[in-house]
Amino acid sequence: MDKNKFLRLKFLVLIVIFSFNACTGQQTIFTVKAPEANVWVVLNASNGAIKYRFLKEGKELIGESEIAIIPNATALKVVGSSVNSKHETWKPVWGQFSEITDEYAELILEVLIEDVKAKLYVRVFNEGIGLRYELEEYKEDTEVDFYCEYNLNNKDVLYSP
């Protein structure tokens, strides 16, 4: 079986698992894996917050950490979820690479944070992750501040400019 067929089969299995979990009621734990399955993110939506863990090759790189968009929100409810994937190669007009491969698995959580509808996009690439919120019904008086913790284990060192 070639690599693409294997990846499609693995992704189909993930969709089936998510579908069965969606039928069992309010799901609070979500997992999304990279196309090569060496990187994954586990999210837990409970107690008014969304927390995530980042794992690579079985090793936890980021321990349970909170991600939020509305500070001090106490009511958070997941109202829907979906999983997507993308595998595309494109040719840039300019740059050092003649082709760029865009490949990832994506979990989209539809959440209700107090009275604000939002979507949390979690993209998992073969080498890392991307997290992004998108507000759907934003009111001008709502304070919004993207907050993302990074709870590293005590063996890691973080360098930042």
Image (cartoon, rainbow, N blue to C red):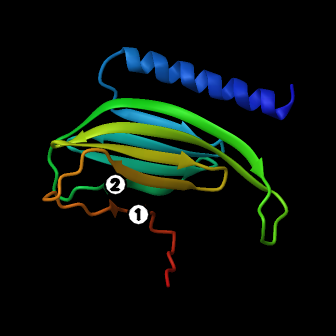
Q: Quadrant of the N terminus?
A: top right
Q: Nearer the viewer, residue 132 or 91?
A: 91
Query: Where is residue 107 shown, x and y percent of the image?
Result: 48, 38
State whether residue 158 appears in this view: yes
Residue picked out by circle 1: 150
State whether residue 36 appears in this view: no
Disc 2: CA contacts within 10 A as few (<14), some (14-19) or many (>=20): many
Which of the 4 image quarters holds residue 66?
Answer: bottom left
How many numbered marks does the figure carry?
A: 2
Element class at badge 2: strand
User: Where 10 falls versus 102 (above or below)?
Assistant: above
Name the outermost residue toward the bottom.
161
User: Where 32 falls versus 157 (above or below)?
Assistant: above
Element class at badge 1: loop
Query: Which amino acid type corresponds to the residue marked 1 in the rendered image?
Result: Tyr
Q: Nearer the viewer, residue 7 or 100?
A: 100
Query: Which amino acid type corresponds to the residue marked 2 in the rendered image?
Result: Ile
Circles 1 and 2 in contact, beta carbons < 8 Å = no
- Mark 1 and mark 2: span between their CA atoms? 9 Å
Query: Where is residue 50 shown, x and y percent of the image?
Result: 31, 46
Residue picked out by circle 2: 67
Disc 1: CA contacts within 10 A as few (<14), some (14-19) or many (>=20): some
Query: Where is residue 58 shown, x and y percent of the image?
Result: 60, 46
Q: Is residue 95 left or right of residue 150?
A: right
Residue at 54% of width from left, 50% of height from top? 55
Residue at 45% of width from left, 63% of height from top? 153
Residue at 20% of width from left, 41% of height from top? 47
| First along the sequence among labels 1 and 2 | 2
Residue at 51% of width from left, 69% of height from top? 155
User: Where 101 falls versus 144 (above or below)?
Assistant: above
